[in-house]
Amino acid sequence: MSSPTGPASGLPVRMPRPRQSGRHRRPEPVAAPEGAPALVLAVPGAPAPATRGLAEETISIARSELPGLDVGIGYLDGDDASEYPTLAGVLARTAARRTERYEIAVAAGREVAAPEGPAAVVVPLLAGPDNVLMRRIRQGVMDSQCAVELSDVLGPHPLLAEALHVRLSEAGLARADRARLFTVATAADGIILATVGGEEAVRAAGITGMLLAARLAVPVMAAALDTEGSVGAIAEQLRGSGSVQLALAPYLVGPELPEGLLDAAVKEAGCSAAEPLGAYPAIGKLVLSQYTTTLGITPQPQGSPAH
């Protein structure tokens, strides 16, 4: 038994761990600034349980990086009477909730500043540009009739090259680590980086493709899944330059990929394919990065006063 003044004799005493200093000191945990706008993820594609699970996991990763963040998920093809609410509906409810919190605080006698600035920042769940989908996202923002900021898409970015590398290695199409002295028998010596969104999307994917090529030490070329003949032409170009074992890497999160398009591209190229990026941790981190960049804020350590 322990005494009122401490543990009984013979039991170890747990002492507080001293705080580390210098470059080995652990970073302070960060939290969302008080009154910060909500982060609303704009999800393309047909709503489905798998899509909802992906979106929820992505937004959970963002919240784990910035505790206290108000979040929401809006679907471009959603229905506000279902479990897949529309982007406009989510934004309208987010703005109303913000006003309600302010009114409750005032009624309770708290001294709080009136809400100003955007009620939310909308982050498209898109690896690269897609003019058609971005027009629909902007329309959803306008339909909400709320003060909202719209961020850029997630790429190009080195973290997406990392995610593509991981998906290829999971499919047995690339070595997991260039530093290891082993090879994968099915490893590709040429990668088709497949995207949707036309020529602009292909150009943007090409930037991430250069980063992926540097990681794998094999040629990587981008192609448009939604442009007839694009994948086949790139496959022919890679083979013409000496690549024998091709692989197709979808430069897509997943929900924006029309059904059947990837299977058709695999047949056209005559090669194996990796899975889309999905809820890879980097996706959630990039969603949060677009949120903070759009607002021009730096997450503060928890407990720090807001400036």
Image: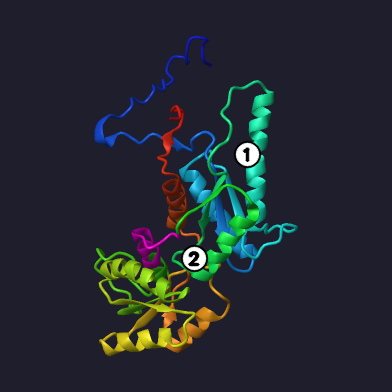
Magenta-colored span: 153-165
Does the magenta portion include 159? yes
- Is there any visible trace of residue 172 in the rendered image? no
Q: Amino acid at mark 2?
A: Val
Residue 215, position as x, y percentages in the image: 28, 66
Q: Is residue 144 above or below residue 195?
A: above
Residue bearing mark 2: 253
Q: Residue at x 56, y 75 (%)?
A: 258
The tag on residue 302 is none
Residue bearing mark 1: 98
Determine whether the residue tagged by mark 2 lies in a helix, strand or loop. loop
126 or 51, which lies in front? 126
The answer to which image quadrant residue 113 occupies is top right
**Among numbered discs 1 and 2, the one appearing first in the sequence:** 1
Pair 1/2: label in front? 1
The answer to which image quadrant residue 160 occupies is bottom left
Q: Amino acid at mark 1?
A: Arg
68 or 201, which lies in front? 201
**Could you tell whether 86 is left or right of 257 in the image?**
right
Determine whether the residue tagged by mark 1 lies in a helix, strand or loop. helix
**Could you tell whether 31 is left or right of 247 in the image?**
right
